[in-house]
Image (cartoon, helix red, strand yellow):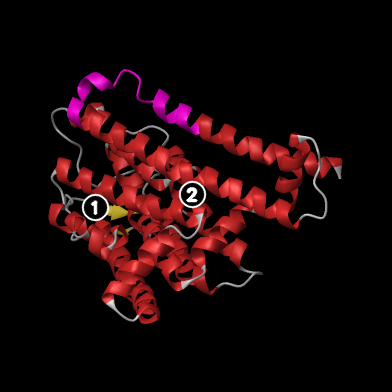
Amino acid sequence: MENARLIALSIFVSYFLAIICLFGVILNSFRGLVGAASKSKVLAFSGLTVASFAHTWFYMFEFMHWSFSDYETTASSIAEAPLDRLTDWLLNTALFEQAWAVVSFGKMNWWWSEQLCLFTVGFWTAFLYFQGSRYGVKHVWAYMLLGQLVAISVASSLFYLAIILSPRQRGYKPLEPSLAPPVLWVSTFIALACVFRSPYTDESAFLLNLLVMHGLIVVPLFFVNSAKMAFWIPVESLYGMYLLAAVTMRIKTTAAAWESSGSGAKFLMDAWSTLHSHPAQSSIGYDVVWTTMSFMAWSILEGGGVMASLLAPVTSVGISAPLSVWPAKVDKRKIDKS
């Protein structure tokens, strides 16, 4: 039993240590690059990073407080020492599952959460892969892991900042890639299937579905500069399939949420009340809001897909992001990665 308590406490501490290490890896890669970038853009995305982190993690700590209190109200006994109380809570609570269950089940709950899942699993994974290679961004995998452990809005703002700070922004910019490798499209297509399945899973499949979805989208980012192999597909086709999947799922999810609300005014009221119905829902809901704002700022400041990005508050960032780059603006010459 003591070993189990130690493991539970170690996992909790390791979670925060991993976050600190990931921030360290990313921020350390920025050293010496500031002078090559527009100061206004650096300030904009630095501000978005700090604001989104503060806002989403206010609710994350609220969720932890709620979970701790909820455990102790049902516990048969409560230890006296604070560390023992903390360990008892961690040992008897599945925090990851608890948070995702809140945001996945319920028509309006999933209406919020699906937006972030579609953006992350589709467009953003590909964006990290292609632009990380194009601009020589170091440790691309760290941005995805940080997004999963902290917030996608925080990680995406930092990645936009990394591109802005890249020395390759000066003078001739590298070509956009024209082909997508199988490690990217296979991983993201399976992960998209997991997104579709999420609100329909039961207790036996819920955790596995989540782990597969989260794990698969990290895999391609360890192979950003991989050699050219068979079964590569056009980038334009990849983004087109992301867009088709996102539109299909959003229509289905929005129709279900609309049906439960009954009218436009009631739909908006339900969306607002659901956003603040639980700390876990508020954390991921405002992650959607900040991710959308950061993506819009990127599109406007970089001058790409502006019209599509302006639709994000209405269509969701999961749709507007792939729409902004589809048809993909790529150099039609095949890029030899061998």
Q: Horizontal placement of 326 versus 260: left or right?
A: left
Residue type at tag 2: Val
Helix, strand or loop for disc 2: helix
Nearest the viewer among 125 and 272 is 272
Query: Where residue 269 appears, x then y in whole percent?
Result: 34, 68
Nearest the viewer among 155 and 129 is 155
Query: Which one is earlier in the sequence, the residue at label 1 or at label 2?
Result: 1
Query: Where residue 275 appears, x then y in whole percent?
Result: 41, 59
Disc on res. 323: none
Q: Which residues are magenta?
A: 22-40
Q: Which residue is mark 1?
A: 178
Q: Which residue is mark 2?
A: 219
Give the image quarter of residue 115.
bottom left
User: On the rendered image, what quadrant is the C terminus found in?
Assistant: top left
Q: Main SS type for the magenta part?
A: helix
Mark 2 residue crowding within 10 angstroms, few (<14) / some (14–19) / many (20+): some
Residue type at tag 1: Ser
Q: Is residue 93 visible?
A: no
Measure the alpha-carbon separation of dots 1 and 2.
20 Å
Is 61 located above or below residue 115 in the figure?
above
Query: Where residue 167 appears, x then y in whole percent?
Result: 24, 26
